[in-house]
Image (cartoon, rainbow, N blue to C red):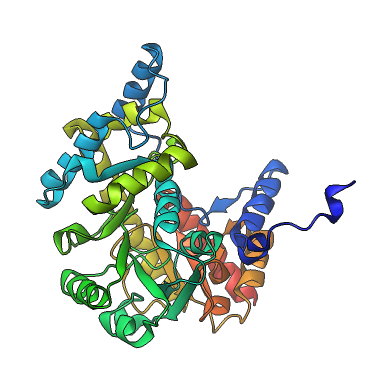
Amino acid sequence: MSLSNFKWADRVAEVAPFHVMQLLSRARQLQAEGRDVIHMEVGEPDFPTAAPIVAAGQDALAKGLTQYTPAAGLPELREAIAGHYQTAYGVSVDPKRVIVTPGASGALLLLAALLVNPGDQVLMADPTYPCNRNFMRLFSGEPKLIPVGAESQFQLTAQHIEQHWAENTRAAMLATPSNPTGTLVDESALQAISQAVAERNGALIVDEIYQGLTYGVDALTALSVNDDTFVINSFSKYFGMTGWRLGWLVAPECAVPELDKLAQNIFLSATTPSQYAALAAFQPETIAILEERRAEFARRRDYLLPALRDLGMSIPVTPEGAFYIYAGVDHLTDDSYQWCQDLLEQEAVAATPGLDFGIEGARSTVRFAYATDLVQLERAIERIARFIQRG
């Protein structure tokens, strides 16, 4: 029997691929052929992992610290994460509520398994990071994408919760700072959303993966508003540890035993050397390095934002976090995927089409990542301008 005729599980067809991965594959092919490709498509900081973190990881390996940790993570790392909330945000978190996971994706996987039954609905913004909805689909949930616009900073509001909550709705999910828009949910909006969800006996999930990468405004955690919020975070973005695959989840105390049980069965534990390395992430010398990098991201944003606007792109809300600009290109195309393909082929600039992030307006939007240096961004703008002029 050949598996070529085997019928895969129905859920596979319900999970959409990343459109950008096809573009990334082509970009790498062009590079292999000698083309000078400027990458503005992938959400990965271009800085190497900070030296103190690398040294801590190397030290763990040298000492043979490579065996399994408890499923919820190294106790000392859970304590360090809890201490970070106190130091950075003035929020007291019991370390027992912290679950260390293989990337933030591991945290989202745990939450989907914990919260979603088949047919349960989870409210989230359109646009949003695609994995957020795809994980819910993996557990036969129904992600409900709610179109949002500039009037709400491309974020869900309490009014959206009230309008779209249905009998089968179990949870609402926010992302602040957001991928792809870089916008934030402020404290008053968080309070209103939290109250609206609580009144409906639902769960609130807040993706804070880009927390710390904010510009001109102070970072905020949803835990300062509602202690019962499920908060997802990561060492990938602000801490620059993408390939180390390490994240965490802060959960209400009542959920921890079930999450621990799920973690034991799904992934057993996060990578041990990565956890020891992450202990150095909160040291003052590391934070100083990361803050310098945050300032550099701000300089990049402050260059790229007006430059894209000068090219006629619609960016009605100034992004205050992450390292993305979500730009409207409806005056240039009604097929942003083809537009991105043509930009890559003709000018060797790689960007992400809006199709990866939602439905509403997806064919007339493009996400540009400024996770590359200013010189490259300046060169990219020259190329994009030439591409637009060519028509």
For residue 69, above or below residue 288: above
Q: Whole-percent x and y of residue 182?
A: 35, 65
* Viewer-closest of 166 and 299: 166
* Marker count (numbered): 0
Name which residue lies at 40% across and 13% down. Answer: 64
Name which residue lies at 31% across and 43% down. Answer: 99
Quadrant in the picture for the C terminus: bottom right
Q: Whole-percent x and y of residue 88?
A: 14, 47
Outermost residue, top direction?
Answer: 63
Outermost residue, bottom direction?
Answer: 163
Name which residue lies at 36% across and 79% down. Answer: 316
Q: Is residue 187 left or right of residue 141?
A: left
Tell me, yes or no, if residue 226 can be seen here: yes
* Viewer-closest of 275 and 313: 275
* Viewer-closest of 88 and 304: 88
Quarter of the image where one finds residue 323: bottom left
